[in-house]
Amino acid sequence: MTVPEARRLKDLEAENAKLKKLLAEQLLAIEGLKEIAGEKW
């Protein structure tokens, strides 16, 4: 693996972690809204 490839991999892994965190936050928000709305999904 070349240095540019390693840097690209590191950048993609960081972006992936950021997106996973965002997804988890959105899923928690959805669950909270469902509880507020009184719906049991």
Image: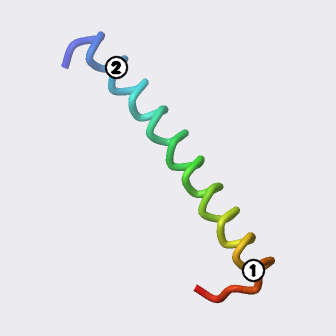
Q: Residue at x 80, y 77 (%)?
A: 36
Per the image, label 2 sits on a secondary structure element best described as: helix
- Where residue 34 sits: x, y (%)? 70, 76
- Where residue 20 sits: x, y (%)? 51, 49
Residue position for label 2: 8
Single out the residue that lies furthest toward the left.
1
* Amino acid type assigned to the residue bearing label 2 in the image: Arg
| Label placed on residue 19 | none
How many numbered marks are there? 2
33 relative position to 15: left or right: right
Per the image, label 1 sits on a secondary structure element best described as: helix
Look at discs 1 and 2 and give the one toward the viewer: 1
User: In which quadrant of the rendered view does residue 7 lie?
Assistant: top left
40 in relation to 16, above or below: below
Disc on the earlier residue, 1 or 2: 2
Q: Residues within 10 Å of mark 1 (few under 14, many from 20)?
A: few
Q: Measure how far apart labels 1 and 2 are at the Cα level.
A: 41 Å
Q: Residue at x 76, y 86 (%)?
A: 38
Residue position for label 1: 35
Quadrant where the C terminus is found in the figure:
bottom right
Single out the residue that lies furthest toward the right.
36
* Amino acid type assigned to the residue bearing label 1 in the image: Glu
5 in relation to 10, above or below: above
Q: Residue at x 31, y 20 (%)?
A: 6
- Where residue 1 sits: x, y (%)? 19, 20
